[in-house]
Amino acid sequence: MVSQGRSLIRTCTLAGMAVIAFILALVEPAFAAKFESTYNQILGLPSRKVIWFIAQMHLYMGSFVLAIPMFVVVIEYVGFKSKSKKFDDLAYEFCSLLSVAYAVTAALGGTLAFALMTLYPTFWGFMSSMFKDVMWIYALLFFGETFTLYIYYYGWHAFTDYTQMIAKKWRMVFQTVGWVGTVFGFLFTIDVKAVMPYATLEDGSKHYWLTGDQPSLIGCTILLAGISFLLINHKKGFHIFLGVWLNIFGTWIMYLANSWASFMMSPVGVDEAGQITISAFEAVINPLWGPVAIHRLLGNLAFGGFVGGAYAAVKFIGSSSAEEKAHYDWMGYVSNFVGLCGLIPLPFAGYYLGRQVYSNSAVMGNNMMGGDFSWTFIIQAMLVGGLFLVSTYYLWSGMCRIPGSERYHKWFKFLLGALVISFMTWLTPHNMPLSGEESAQMGGGQFHPVLKFAGLMPAKNAVVNMIILSTFFSFVLYRRGNKKDLVPISKQGRAPYIAIPIAGAICIALVGQYGYYLYTLDPATLDLPDDEMRRGFFQMAGMALFTNNALVVIACILALVFNKPVAGQYVYLFGTGAIVTGWFGYEGFLVMEKASPFLRNVAVSQFLELISCIILVVTIDIFAFKDSKEIAPIQWGKIPERSQYALIALTILIAFNMGLMGFIRSGLRVNWHIFGIMEDTSQWSFTLDNMWLTMIVSTAVFCTLSIIAFGFWLSNLAHPAEEHGADESPEALPGAAVEAPGSAAS
Amino acid sequence: METLGLFLKIYGSAFVITILALRFYWDKVNNQVRAIGKVFLFLVGLVLTYMFVGWKITMMTGGEKGMVARATGVSADNGEAIYWGRGRCTTCHSLGTRGSAVRCPNHGVQLGKDFVTDPARLSAMGERIVMRAEERTKATGEQWAPVDYLWECMGEPGGYVVAGFKNEMPYVYKAPINLNLEDVQSVIMYLWAQDGEPDINVVMNPTGPGKRFHDLIKKTTEEAATASPFITYIDGDAEAGRKMFFDPKSPAPCFKCHTHGDKGGTVGPVLTTVGGTRSTEFIIESILKPSAVIASGFEPIKLETVDGEIITGVDAGVTDTEAKIKLSTGEERAIPIDKLKGGKFGTKPKVVIKTFNKKIKGWFLEDKEDSVEVMNLKGTEKIVIPKNTIKSTVKLKKKNADGKKKVEGFIKAEDDEKITLVKKDGSEIAIAKADIKKVRKGYRKPAVMSIMPGNFRDLLSVKNLHDIVAFLKAG
């Protein structure tokens, strides 16, 4: 307890440092920004690289610290619902990694703030005057995060049973608050105008403050807060409540810090004379705030999951007993699953962010793939392709421990072919750096006569969908590896007849509404001439989406009426694959030539179809293999050691990618601290090359992973190796046998 | 490249050391340590691979992308440089087969049977300009020449959007691209040159509808060039500022030294009209950095008496018999000269100057071109110190050719890149600033420090400062 107390004090001190840093930033007069920019150096080092390195380290640690609670609370909840001690222990094991990581993150945050204050005082002066009110809230949120984290972690064993802990009248209060919060949060999330904040304009009309994705981003945290109150019944419920609030604080810390970075890219409320015309809160909800937040949330989840996987992999490699290997194999699998949950939608979030960057500033947007960063995106393509290839490889390796999965090995060669072709297509640049001689050999142009098509956006969008579908299909095969003697859907009661049609209806609504929108879209909306050809493009896309709807119906009928759920899955999966890659891939080229603004609608269509495919196929999968017999149990631990290097590679690759994308996002501002408003007049005002990118990012990755490894080591000191049983069967949590009123219902 | 080498050495060494450590200690450590060693090797291997990719791509595609220096003058050649560089035109436009962007219209002629088949994009630039000019003539009723259309594209890009494309071209003469008028004229020359002989006189002095856009660009870029880099925004409450100004208990009771209206002290300048005569930036700087600019007639003075008393205030006049000083309390004191350390020279700043032979302390008199004049501390002897005898010390990062890390001499010249020293033996040496670790100068002209407290930065909150400035600006 003494060491825990010291740890708490130490961490609070570090968190306090971060808070003090921001408070000092407020003391630093904002007016410095109005003079000629001042730039300082420390130890003669180039300030920009110093800031870059510290910021990158802070972001890595921050994403790890924010991601871990996300899945810890989910795993804890799964353990709570299934009364499984195994999941509960796993959640605690992950949680124990947080303590040191949080302290280091706070220390790095303080260092970053001081570095900005001292090295870029003018810029920081302006930022702190712009966001002065929000920075105070940010500092206060740190207190919330700190205390919640430590009560959550240190109170894990104190709040582990199902003993009633509050009086009935208080439970009523919490339930009421919970339901009000849940309903309000839900309405907020789906942007019901009745609950949205607004201002009344002079003409009497309403101006709603939040637009686009902003209500959903804020609403989901309110929704979570509401749900968390419904959990307060017994001690375990209260503990999960704390976990949810830990996530809420963490998410808002990230939201606010994101707003400063996104403000630098898409500033609002500063007129051409440099005068601030809006409040700090309005500056937070700048145009790129939402897209950056979504991208980071998913990125954090993927990074956190993969880091957890790497931890398990190292432990697996170093394990000497079969029991330990079994435990860490399982832990690595769960972590990888979490990482994939973040990774699969990440390319879409990236596309959305890129699209919003472009919408906000065509100059900035064009500088991405078509400008200074075109080759950086080639490196990014290598990394993202690598991520999907390696994670798929891990799934395939994992099937070695599943008796009966040999039946599906035949698919691997096709999947590998699809992945490699897609990967190669994604890697192909549109125009190549050619010598005059090489150019002449290709007919005088800059493009290869055939390969140039692979370099265009429609091809990229098509193959990324193929890559994701291939990985998803591998996961589907993994799940059914050892299953046999399927129980017909018709013998499973009402549940599949409710769940599958609901999933189907969601898919039809998701895809169908967009299909209808495209089918009836007026070309003038996209500044395009209203002619038959353009309308034809829109209708063609609409038809593709309606076709997808038809496939949903077929899949549901096959599953529910003909008891052929697997056939239904294949029809929908392969149908979707054909549409998103073939149909939309082809249409993308046509559209690009004749109506390029419509290309983004094509990409959205592909995304919606893919998400629908995942929803319906997973739902059918749950019932298709429910209660089926196992050829043999999964033999945890009997997986080749090389597969563990795949888990480690995933962590390193995603960290490389995060650093690279951060470089691009930040570098898009080129010679501007705040795009179009405050110019960077320092000697470092230029875009660094890709060699520097890889050197700085590699070093940041190296240092971050070393720190995280150190944290793992400390965690092991605090929690000496425990015996891990290979048995998968759930063990009851303490007190679980005692029926707690409303324990599961809430 | 040098840095890359350093990085490679570090990671390479880590790689080799780990292999050796694993090789020699393999049997002496447990499985977990071995696992960490193997994973560490794997990490370093991936890091090296990543750096190799970055290096290879940089070698293939070029290095850092700085802001290109502005070419001066108007010409098609300059226009080409801007079109393919700073103007960022090619991120959206292609020119014939050059470039790959398809987001916006191609500015050239697409040769051969290419992917692009739209006739509007196949025709030559010149033909299309003529066509556009005719369309604009019909639409507006004015007579448009082709060059007028190009001016419109630059000045008001949304004025005419080519069918099939989106209205998304930015104002290239505003932030963030910030082309100036000459840049825009050069680009017009370049585009015109794609299919014809551009007439520079027409580009420089448009007379048709294009003149409107020319004038708009000219006005906007000139305003931007002369604008303050950043204008202070003050959202203070003038009334709160007034209260603070006159409140003796406030963190900034300015009235003790300054008069505003008919009330206040006389130690500092009258501030009644400062809001009208000085910029906001100047007022803020005067509060936060009082010594940056000192108002004429309010030069500070610091006196030290033979009894050891130190008195600071504003110089109110020095005669042969007494030195008058206005204190920050508003009170004026007259100190007899014979009570001052250094006598009548005691009103001067005290300096310490290091020469090659000795250290000289005295009262600063004058800084001449070749020498510095000081009065000795007793006020009895004037010392003229030739500047070429003043010793400065330059510490180097590495040993020089003579094997020394420290060079002493008189600083003869200094610029951004180097310092030229004259050593005691008369020989000159130029030292690059990049090689210098530290410079200790033997003489610095005494700085004049305001008597106004320098800690308002700490005493005032942002709001306090806003309020006071708002009060002063309100007049």
Image (cartoon, helix red, strand yellow):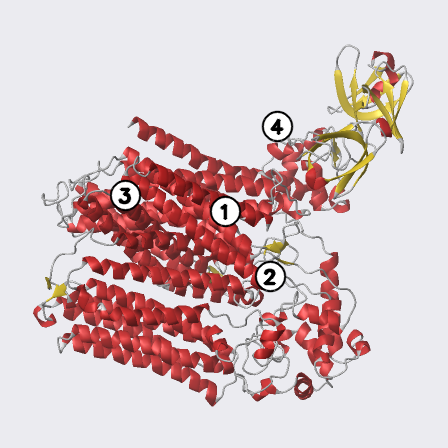
Residue that label 4 marks: B249
Q: Residue furthest right?
A: B320
Q: Position of residue A69 (x, y in %)?
A: 32, 47
Q: Is residue B397 left or right of residue A534?
A: right
Secondary element at image label 4: loop
Q: Nearer the viewer, mark 1 or mark 4?
A: 1
Per the model, the C-alpha gap separating discs 4 and 3 is 69 Å
Q: Position of residue A10 (x, y in %)?
A: 39, 31
How many neighbours does mark 4 have within 10 angstroms: few (below 14), some (14-19), or many (20 or more)?
few
As displayed, is residue B467 above or below residue A498? above
Per the model, the C-alpha gap separating discs 1 and 4 is 43 Å
The reply to whether callout 1 and callout 3 are in contact (CB within 8 Å) is: no
As displayed, is residue A738 above or below residue A369? above
Q: Position of residue B242 (x, y in %)?
A: 66, 38
Disc with the residue nearer the chain's start (1 vs 3) = 1
Residue A318: give its label: 3
Tell me what residue is drawn at x 77 percent, y 24 percent.
B313
How many neighbours does mark 1 have within 10 angstroms: few (below 14), some (14-19), or many (20 or more)?
many
Q: Quick check: do tags 1 and 3 share a chain?
A: yes
How many neighbours does mark 2 have within 10 angstroms: few (below 14), some (14-19), or many (20 or more)?
few
Tell me what residue is drawn at x 76 percent, y 31 percent.
B268
Residue that label 1 marks: A55
Q: Position of residue A392 (x, y in %)?
A: 31, 62
B282 and A551: which is toward the camera: A551
The reply to whether callout 3 and callout 2 are in contact (CB within 8 Å) is: no
Say whether residue A284 is visible.
Answer: no
Quadrant of the rendered structure where residue B426 is? top right
Q: Quick check: do tags 4 and 3 share a chain?
A: no
Q: Amino acid at mark 1?
A: Ala
Q: Amino acid at mark 3?
A: Gly
